Amino acid sequence: MILTVQLPAGRHSFKRKHGMGPAISSEMHRPLVTTVYRIARIPTVKRQLLAVVEVDAFIPERHRTHIAPSDPRWVRPGVLRTKAYWIDNKKSRALGQFLASDALEVHLEDEA
């Protein structure tokens, strides 16, 4: 299945004004349309405003520059565990059916 997923695109940090606390560091993301092998609900989110799911997505070689090879989100070579938002994938029938169902996880290896 093809979905738009959130791909890590490096880190961003900035210092606050003096006396306002420590520096803030966050990970930037950018959208990538790619093949997804697994969709799963995020277990820690009970009531969420944005529908978001965890996906195992194939990441092409040219898009792997900002992701460390030792990152624990790599499931297997070339496949990264990341997030996909419903707002970016409104036209995906399979994602809509998954969100409407009570399933916790769906493997899509056969369809890909």
Image (tube, rainbow, N blue to C red):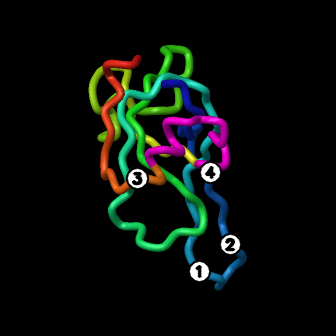
Q: Compute the Cα span from label 4 to label 1.
A: 17 Å
Question: Could you tell me which secondary element the residue under label 3 belongs to?
Answer: loop
Q: Compute the Cα span from label 2 to label 3.
A: 44 Å
Cβ atoms under marks 2 and 1 closer than 8 Å? yes
Q: Nearer the viewer, mark 2 or mark 3?
A: 3
Question: What crowding class fits label 3: few (fewer than 14 Cα within 10 Å), some (14-19), or many (20 or more)?
Answer: few
Looking at the rendering, in which quadrant would you find the C terminus? top left
Name the residue rendered at 48%, 44% in the picture.
97
**Mark number displayed over residue 16:** 2
Q: How many marks?
A: 4
Q: Nearer the viewer, mark 4 or mark 2?
A: 4
Question: Per the image, is 75 magenta?
Answer: no
Q: Compute the Cα span from label 3 to label 1.
A: 44 Å
Q: Which residues are magenta?
A: 86-98
Question: Could you tell me which secondary element the residue under label 1 belongs to?
Answer: loop
Instruction: Name which residue type carries label 1.
Output: Gly
Please report whichever mark, 2 or 1, sits nearer to the chain's N-terminal start.
2
Which residue is identified by label 3?
A: 101
Instruction: Name which residue type carries label 4.
Output: His
**Mark number displayed over residue 2:** none
Which residue is identified by label 4?
A: 12
Question: Could you tell me which secondary element the residue under label 2 belongs to?
Answer: loop
Could you tell me what secondary structure mostly forms the magenta stretch? helix
Question: What crowding class fits label 2: few (fewer than 14 Cα within 10 Å), some (14-19), or many (20 or more)?
Answer: few
